[in-house]
């Protein structure tokens, strides 16, 4: 249901292989899992200012942005500088079967957790098939009535002739 979109991932991988560069960790690594009717996406974002977090969804594309700022004294001189800082962004393309309007987000202990429910229309549902008898109006010998009940409380009835395909 979720498709990963990271246009620079393959370019980074290729550059690392060609130039023999050491692999650097992803700036916003994520986990995605499904539990019941909900997808849970977790982004590891330590040190991100919660006020800089922006989560938006447009045209089935989920965008997560955040900024990690350095807060150093003016007279500081770095001996080693390995902690990344700056603005980060990540996009995920969501499938049509997800309820984009009901996404919830929580940021705790450096982890942003998004919960994306499966849309009602995409949830599996049971379709009842009834067997019409000879006494039902509108049926004739060799036909049966099929009743299809959807999740939106509509009922559809079809008359199917024996041996016919629909």
Image: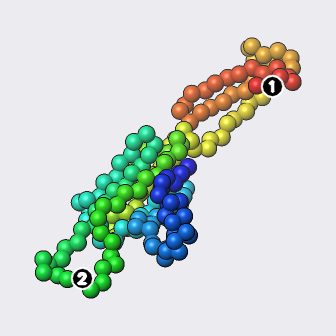
Query: At x 69% / y 28%, what residue is drawn?
Result: 147
**Closer mark to the observer between disc 2 and disc 1:** 2
Where's residue 94, x and y in %?
49, 47
Q: Nearer the viewer, residue 81 or 157?
A: 81
Where's residue 157, x and y in %?
67, 23
Query: At x 44% / y 68%, what residue is drawn?
Result: 26
Q: Please determine whether, in this image, residue 59 is positioned above or below residue 26.
A: above
Query: At x 57% / y 44%, what residue is drawn?
Result: 123
Query: At x 44% / y 63%, what residue is drawn?
Result: 42
Q: Nearer the viewer, residue 165 or 82?
A: 82
Q: Nearer the viewer, residue 128 or 120?
A: 120
Q: Quadrant of residue 83?
A: bottom left
Q: Is residue 101 visible?
A: no
Residue at disc 2, secondary structure: loop
Where's residue 104, x and y in %?
38, 53
Q: How many neighbours does mark 2 have within 10 angstroms: few (below 14), some (14-19), or many (20 or more)?
A: few
Q: Nearer the viewer, residue 129 or 35?
A: 35
Residue at disc 1, secondary structure: loop
Mark 2–mark 1 distance (CA, rounded to whole Å): 75 Å
- Asked whether, in this view, residue 145 is left or right of residue 150, the answer is right
Give the quadrant of the C terminus.
top right
Q: Please determine whether, in this image, residue 114 is positioned above or below residue 111.
A: above
Q: Please determine whether, in this image, residue 144 is positioned above or below residue 118.
A: above
* Residue tagged 1: 165
Q: How many neighbours does mark 1 have within 10 angstroms: few (below 14), some (14-19), or many (20 or more)?
A: few
* Residue tagged 2: 78
Q: Residue furthest front?
A: 19
Q: Residue furthest left?
A: 74
Where's residue 37, x and y in %?
53, 52
């Amino acid at each position: 249901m979720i498709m990963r979109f990271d246009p620079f991932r393959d370019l980074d991988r290729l550059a690392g292989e060609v130039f023999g560069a050491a692999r650097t960790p992803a700036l916003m690594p994520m986990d995605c899992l499904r539990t019941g009717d909900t997808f849970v996406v977790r982004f590891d974002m330590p040190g991100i200012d919660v006020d800089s977090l922006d989560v938006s969804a447009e045209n089935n594309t989920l965008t997560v942005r955040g900024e990690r700022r350095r807060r150093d004294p003016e007279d500081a001189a770095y001996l080693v500088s390995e902690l990344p800082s700056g603005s980060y962004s990540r996009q995920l393309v969501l499938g049509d079967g997800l309820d984009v309007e009901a996404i919830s987000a929580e940021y705790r202990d450096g982890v942003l957790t998004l919960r994306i429910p499966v849309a009602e229309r995409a949830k599996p549902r049971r379709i009842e098939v009834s067997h019409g008898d000879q006494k039902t109006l509108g049926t004739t010998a060799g036909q049966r009535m099929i009743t299809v009940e959807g999740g939106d409380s509509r009922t559809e009835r079809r008359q199917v002739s024996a041996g016919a395909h629909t």
